[in-house]
Image (cartoon, rainbow, N blue to C red):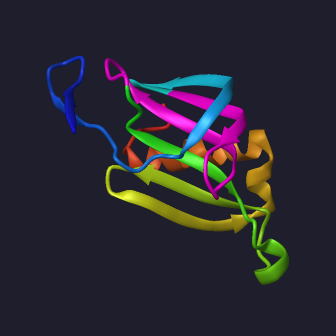
Amino acid sequence: MRTLDGEGNVARIMEYVPLIQSAKPLRRHTIGAYELVLWGEIVSVGAVQYTYIVAVHREGVEEPVLYVAAEVNAMRRVFGGGSHFLAVFDDEGHHNYGASDRWGDADTFFTHAEELIRARLELSDA
């Protein structure tokens, strides 16, 4: 599925996204033409549980262009690893960046998510 952004460019709507029933916006931050929204108090749908999600919206485009999520590591006691996986959802699918207890903290997660978003969208630190 495709749609037009605010400048008339074709913007692809992602087909694979975090499945949630509800969430509460905790923080908003703007980087250039992008707005980052940190969501918490998430009621997930399905097997994957999310503690935090950052939705990245490009100016003029209703649907997010990217998500970064802190996914609960439900198998931690069996296989070890951190309490949460750091995951990215983009128009190519789901990408796992490993597990850490750090992703369970909103401030730490948001800071790292912003760094990851800047790198993936090739945005400067200015």
Residue 80 place in picture, x, y as percent = 80, 79
The answer to whether residue 39 is magenta is yes
Q: Is residue 24 left or right of residue 121?
A: right
- By secondary structure, the bulk of the magenta-drawn segment is best described as strand
Q: Is residue 67 left or right of residue 43?
A: left
Compared to 94, does 9 lie above or below?
Answer: above
Magenta residues (range)? 36-62
Asked whether 118 or 101 is in front, the reply is: 101
Residue 13 place in picture, x, y as percent = 30, 38
Asked whether 43 or 123 is in front, the reply is: 43
Residue at 62%, 58% in the rendered image: 86
Residue at 49%, 43% in the rendered image: 67
Q: Is residue 3 left or right of residue 64?
A: left
Residue 112 place in picture, x, y as percent = 64, 48
Q: Is residue 59 left or right of residue 28?
A: left
In this view, the residue farthest toward the bottom is 79
Residue at 41%, 33% in the rendered image: 64
The answer to whether residue 2 is magenta is no
Q: Quadrant of residue 37?
A: top right
